[in-house]
Structure formats: C-alpha cells, structure tokens
Image (tube, grey):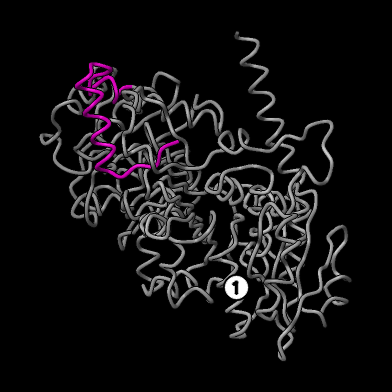
Amino acid sequence: MLLVTAEAMRALEARTFQTGCATGIELMARAGVGVVDAVERRWGTVLGLRALVCCGTGNNGGDGFVAARRLRERGAAVRVVIAGDPSRVAGDAKTALESMRAAGIEPQSAAGEDALRAIAAAHDRWDFAFDALLGTGARGAPEGAIADAVQVLREIDEVGTPVVAIDLPTGVDADTGAIARRAVRAELTVTFGEPKRGHLLYPGRAFVGALEVVDIGLAPLVPGDPVALVRVTTAADVAALVPRRDPRAHKGRTGRVLVIGGSLGLTGAVTMTARAASRAGAGYVTVAVPESLHDAVAAQLDSQIPLVCPETTSRALAPAAYEHLADAFARADVVALGPGLSLDPESAALARRIALETPLPVVIDADALTALAADPSQLARAAGPRVLTPHLGEMSRLTKATAEALEESRIDAPRAWAAAWRATVLLKGAPTVTAGPDARTWVNPTGNPGMAMAGMGDVLTGVVAALLAQGLAPTDAAMAGAYVHGEAGDRVAARLGGLGMLPSDVTAALPETLEALARMSDAGRERGSARA
C-alpha cells in the first residue's frame, strides 16, 4: 500500500483523468459511496439513524454531498450543512450538490458558529457526524466558517457522537501530520486511493481514529514511478516474507545468529536479544559476552549458547574479542551487535571494527550505534550489509541533527541517511520507519504505547537478526521485523492491557504472530491455486 503526499495524490488523480480511467465526478461518486459502505462495515446498517454531514465548498464537500445521498438511499435521516457560501461550490462538487438536491436533500448554509450550532442542535443526539470540510489538498489552519464548523464537530464528538472524517480530519496536515489549534477528532477516517503521510504521522495520527482506505479506481502506476518507493507495511507484505522451514531442516540450516554485547549491569539487554532471535525462528543463537559475566548471562538463557570473550577492566568486551570470535563468525549467518555493550572506549573500538570489517550482515543497535557516531560515513565502506536500528536520540548522535528536526522529517530523514550510508536504517518510534539504500521506505502501522519500555528495542534487534539469518534481504528483514514486533505487542496489549507489558511478553508472543502471518500467506496461495 502506497503512502503518498498531497502532491503525489494530485498527480495520481491527474494521471487517472489523462489516461481515461475515470473522470473527476466518477472518482467523487466512488469516494462518497465508499464512505457510507465503510461506516456500515464498521457499525452496521445506517437504516433509521440520524446523520449530520458538514461540507465545505470544495471537492471534499462534493464527497460529502455524495455520501449524504448514499446515506439517504440506505435509510438514514440526513441533514447537510455547508460551511460557507453555497455559490462558491463549483465543478464536480457542484454536480454532486445538484444530484443531492435532486434526491430530495436540501443543504443549509451557515456562515457562523452560532448558526452551525443551531443546526447541530436540531436533534438532542446525532448518531453520526461527517467531516467533509477540507480534504487532502488543504494548507494552513482552518479559517472562517470552516473553523467554526470544526469547533461544532469537536463539541459533537465530546458528547459521544462518532465523527467520520472524509479523506482527512480537518485541521490535520496531509503531509506532516501537524495539527491546527482546532482540528476534528475522528473515530473513523475514510480516505481514497492511498493513505496520506498525515494519517500515520503524529500528532495527526491521534486525530484519525480507525483508518479505512477505499479503492476509487486510480490509474495504475507506471514502472519506476518514484511515488511507489514509500509504502505502508501491510500484513500481506509481511506474510509473503515469513520464512518457511523445509521438513528436513535442522538447527544449522534455520538461521544462526551471533549476538555480541553485554557488560557489567547490562546483561539483560543481550539476553533479551538472544531470546527474541530464537522466538523469531533462528535455529542456533550464540551470545558473546565478557568472561566474568558468563554465569550471569547463562542463567538468563534457555536454548541459546553463551560464549566467553576477553574483557576490559570495566568488565565489558575487549578489542581482543575480535580474534577470539573468528570461529563464531565463521559459523554465523548474522551478527546482532550492541545490546548492553557499554560505552567503554575499548568496547566501542571493538564495535567499530566488527561493524566495518565483518563480511557478515550486521544488525547494529544501542551502544554500537554510539560507537559509530563520530564518523558514521564509514558505514558506506562496510564489508557487508548493515541494518541500523536507532531511536531518535541515537539517530541524532549519528546525524548531528536535533531529535526535533528528525521527528519532523521522520520519513525522509531515514531515506536520505540510508542512501548516504549504503545501509538499511530502521528509525524506531511512532511510527517506525524502515528505509533501504535503494530508497525503498516502509512506514510501520503496528505497535502501541504499552511498548514504551526499556528492552523493547533489544527484542526488535533479535527479531530483525533472526529474519536476516533465515534468508530475508536486509531491508525486508527490517521492515518485516518492525511489523512482527509491533503486532506481537498489539497481541499482548489485547490480552493484558496497554500498561505493564514486558519485553518478555512480546518475545513470548512472537511465535503465534509469525504463525498467524504464515497462515495468511498459505490461505492466499490456496485461493490463487483455486482460481488457476
């Protein structure tokens, strides 16, 4: 599923018109009908219910006019209000307005907040209210009658009436997710063709509610279209990548992960990564730790194998561990580097050497990222594929950009740095964004606030490493790993609630999450075979 900017959406619509795939009024008709169909999928029939549809004077208002007519056809009692001068309605929106009037719905116009509030007060309670004030192309804060309508919709929401945003909640920026001082808070947003960046980026994402995407018949993409490079990860995308085991498989052929890290007081991080790698399907996981911490780490492991390495005086890994690990490198498919490593300068030197010289794929996390912060440009010359998994603070250290600036460019910043470093960058957060060196970028929709806990990133590192070890390409492993990790967290939240979940809870949910995705893929193949 694509994730587009407002400009890209306009280009997709223009191509649709130019190629004769659909006219503007046809797209508008499909959009308006799709809104009502989405409402009925979510809440059931609208028969006998009361709906208030607040429309602007542009094309988003036109979508609202079509939706109002569809609501009437489905048996709802509908009242339509135009926030602004009805004489300004033109083009396809005017055609939709005339069709709505022909169906017996006469809109009311309201030029002020008091007039809007009086119309809204026609019923003690509305069953639904629809926001068709401004669409994807709007810029800046709502003003005048539109701002007044936003305030009335907010008041309707506050008394418990579900608000349905048509395309995008008014006051949310389609590209950045920024919100105006007054913005509509929707329980359901129905958008058209493709989701927009503002649907997934905070703070706007908190105003979107549930998101449904309606296919309105846009022209297909042409090969090489750059708009296809940024996508929302879907369950189907990940299901197609979930590793399958050969019936003859043994532990040496199902993914061998070498986890390197741990230091005094930080043994939990390395063990969480190792256990997550096993739960995500890696058949053989080795954990390289400082010699004096062997017993503490071994006590926290189950099927993973601890490996003793030379240590510094601070009981962190010493540079001499590189040669000591030669046999382990030879037996591994992937290295997970950094969990609990510490900021010991000697350990940092070891991390830089592994990150740059090891020909194996390396997932670089935590203190290993800090070790590279002085000159991350060296990553472009690394001996093998690299996946970086920074949070905003670590990304700030690597790029010298502020965390605030990175948050504002949460999608484009990872893309730029992934190209510069010739690596895959998985920027953790809400949402997590994965960008490959080829500019392919994936925005992850899974996960929840309950996962804001120390150790969750260590689990993610283990999942990505396990998928890499089982044969996925680096960017695919990072994209799928982020989705699986978040989906496992969502499953835990559904069972236990959003507060108090532990990284170990998410690790325990990994097998069922992967199994559900595998079954989805198998079902898809069966449907494809049946059609053939």
Point 61% across, 50% down: residue = 481
Q: Specify the segment rendered in magenta.
A: 1-29
Residue 214 against residue 394 in the figure, above or below: above
**Is 470 in the magenta?**
no
The quarter in which the N terminus is drawn is: top left
Q: Disc 1 residue type?
A: Ala
- 262 or 109, which is in the foreground? 262
Q: Where residue 273 appears, x then y in whole percent?
A: 71, 63
Judging by the rendered image, the residue that carries numbered circle 1 is 351
Point 43% across, 28% down: residue = 36
- The 10 Å Cα crowd at callout 1, few under 14, some 14 to 19, many 20 or more, is many
Point 22% across, 43% down: residue = 83
Q: Where residue 508 appears, x then y in whole percent?
A: 79, 54
Residue at the extreme left of the image, as rendered = 87
Note whether residue 531 is visible: yes
Q: Quadrant of residue 368?
A: bottom right
